[in-house]
Image: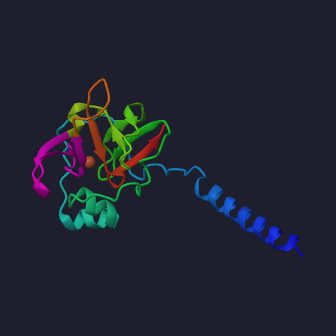
Amino acid sequence: MKTEPCRALLLVLLTALAGCAKRHAPETVTPSPIPVVKEWNMKDRIEKTEAEWQQQLTPEQFQVLRKHGTERAFTGRLWDNKEQGTYVCAGCGLALFESGTKYDSGTGWPSFWQPLKEEHVGTTVDRKFFMTRTEVHCARCGGHLGHVFEDGPKPTGLRYCINSAALEFEKE
Ligand code: FE
């Protein structure tokens, strides 16, 4: 009679463990659906109407890139991505960051201490929400990426805090 509850408990434990294993299985990040632009002459800036962007992007990408939105921390698909490769703009494919400069900032957003090329990202002062922050955007299409802070690691001391939704990942 006593073995039955034990067996039931064991079954519950095994089911829970199987569930955990499933949740923590490494997620594969799908390749960038837009062509990656590695070199950019700073002339072919992308200009599209709001309607065109809305048609091209997912609602989440549109909210972040075109409406300066911010995804909830730890919800994006790239904050914990540890694969080697290039992070590109989800709006226009411009190569923005490399996996070699990505680090775990503990914030739940993909964080980098340096852009791939200085001229690929632009910055503006953002005074929303009673704070003064430096907003980061794609220099080619103007899409909002996130913010840059001065509490990053060496050698730059910068923390580019970027929304997963603003990025696509191209595996090496
Ligand atoms: Fe872009």
User: Which is nearer the eye, 134 or 88?
Assistant: 134
Residue depicted at 41% across the width and 39% down the height = 104
Residue 9 in the image, given as x and y percentages of width and height: 76, 68
Residue 158 in which image quadrant: top left
Residue depicted at 29% across the width and 67% down the height = 55
The quarter of the image holding the N terminus is bottom right
Residue 40 in the image, given as x and y percentages of width and height: 25, 36
Residue depicted at 9% across the width and 52% down the height = 127
- Specify the farthest residue to the bottom: 1
Residue 87 in the image, given as x and y percentages of width and height: 38, 42
Q: Give, as a single range, the part of the protein colored magenta.
A: 122-148
Residue 159 in which image quadrant: top left
Image height of 59 relative to 154, above or below: below
User: Which is nearer the eye, 38 or 166?
Assistant: 166
Q: Tell whether 40 sits left or right of 10.
A: left
Image height of 150 relative to 68, above or below: above
Residue depicted at 61% across the width and 52% down the height = 25
User: Which is nearer the eye, 32 or 148?
Assistant: 148
Report if residue 146 lies within the magenta region.
yes
Give the number of marks: 0
Q: Tell whether 94 sits left or right of 7.
A: left
